[in-house]
Amino acid sequence: MLTVNDIYKTFNGGTVNEKHALNGASLTLEEGEFVTVIGGNGAGKSTFLNAVAGVWPVDAGSILIDGEDVTGLCEYKRAKYLGRVFQDPMTGTAADMEIQENLALAARRGKSRGLGWGISKKEREQYHEMLKILDLGLEDRMTSKVGLLSGGQRQALTLLMATLQKPKVLLLDEHTAALDPKTAAKVLETTERIVNENHLTTLMVTHNMKDAIVHGNRLIMMNEGKIILNIAGEEKKKLTIEQLLHKFEEVSGTEFTSDKAILS
């Protein structure tokens, strides 16, 4: 479903601020795979997701989604293949619009729009049932402005909106990092359920080693713009944080230095 071939990206090339963010990163995801991505600060995790999303063009390499080469497509043209949830709960929703209006926008993404009523009775019933999945009571607040919701509620709603049309690939960029531990656990539980029920191909960047091990069926670790570890199956299920740190040091020849990842 996703094939990333040997991609490179350098920022501020030829200046004192030159940064080689991606250095020949390659990855293949089969349909329905849920892959967690971990690495220290500056390892290239978010840069890799942005490359898949088409936020900016890569310098070399190719990106294919469901067999179609999207390397040359700009972000808005590539968006029809993707669903995305960002780290900031304020991103991904329209704060001044109602919950049901946000869902209606997500449902109409990429479709032609006429001059009919914004939301039909049938759609309201559908949204009511969808919101029940989140178990946050939002189904009884569909006319509430999204700006009144908590960070966790907004993130859960954004997740629902991002998966409403079943994207080819779902990108989760540290989507629980700004939430308190209890809310983050709730959003992750909802994420796992939605991904599994809809058989979504998913890439989830996280700083939390425990979350990276517990969730998904595969774990990759990045360092200096490359994927240096790729762990799946029974090996991933039995993996501990200590073993993961040891594997990183063994492969990279350096110690894992991200305090944020270790402490979380």
Image (tube, rainbow, N blue to C red):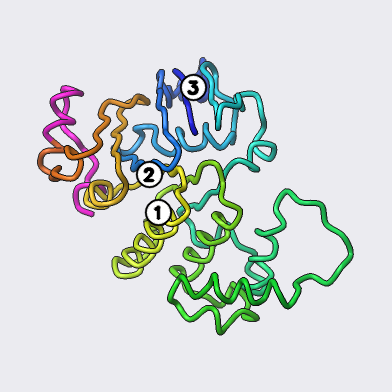
Q: Residue at x 70, y 53 (%)?
A: 109
Q: Is residue 88 left or right of residue 223?
A: right
Q: Position of residue 241 (x, y in %)?
A: 14, 45
Quarter of the image that includes the C terminus = bottom left
Q: Is residue 29 left or right of residue 124?
A: left
Which element is circle 1 on? helix
Up-down relation of residue 30 to residue 110 (above or below):
above
Nearer mark to the viewer, of 2 and 3: 2
How far apart marks 2 and 3 lie (CA) works out to: 28 Å
257 falls in the magenta region: yes
Q: Nearer the viewer, residue 169 or 249?
A: 169
Q: Are marks 2 and 1 in contact (CB under 8 Å)?
A: yes
Which element is circle 3 on? strand
Q: Residue at x 45, y 71 (%)?
A: 134
Nearer mark to the viewer, of 3 and 1: 1
Q: Mark 2 or mark 3: name the one nearer the start of the chain.
A: 3
Query: Outermost residue, bottom direction?
Result: 140
Q: Position of residue 174 (x, y in %)?
A: 40, 50
Q: Residues within 10 Å of mark 3 (few under 14, many from 20)?
A: some
Quarter of the image where one finds residue 228: top left
Q: Which mark is residue 10?
A: 3
Q: What residue does disc 2 label?
A: 34
Q: Which amino acid does the dot numbered 1 rest on? A: Asn
Q: What residue does disc 1 label?
A: 196
Which element is circle 2 on? strand
Q: Are marks 2 and 3 in contact (CB under 8 Å)?
A: no
Q: Mark 3 or mark 1: name the one nearer the start of the chain.
A: 3
Q: Residues within 10 Å of mark 2 (few under 14, many from 20)?
A: many
Most common SS among magenta residues: helix
Find the magenta span and give its range. Answer: 246-264
Q: Residue at x 69, y 65 (%)?
A: 104
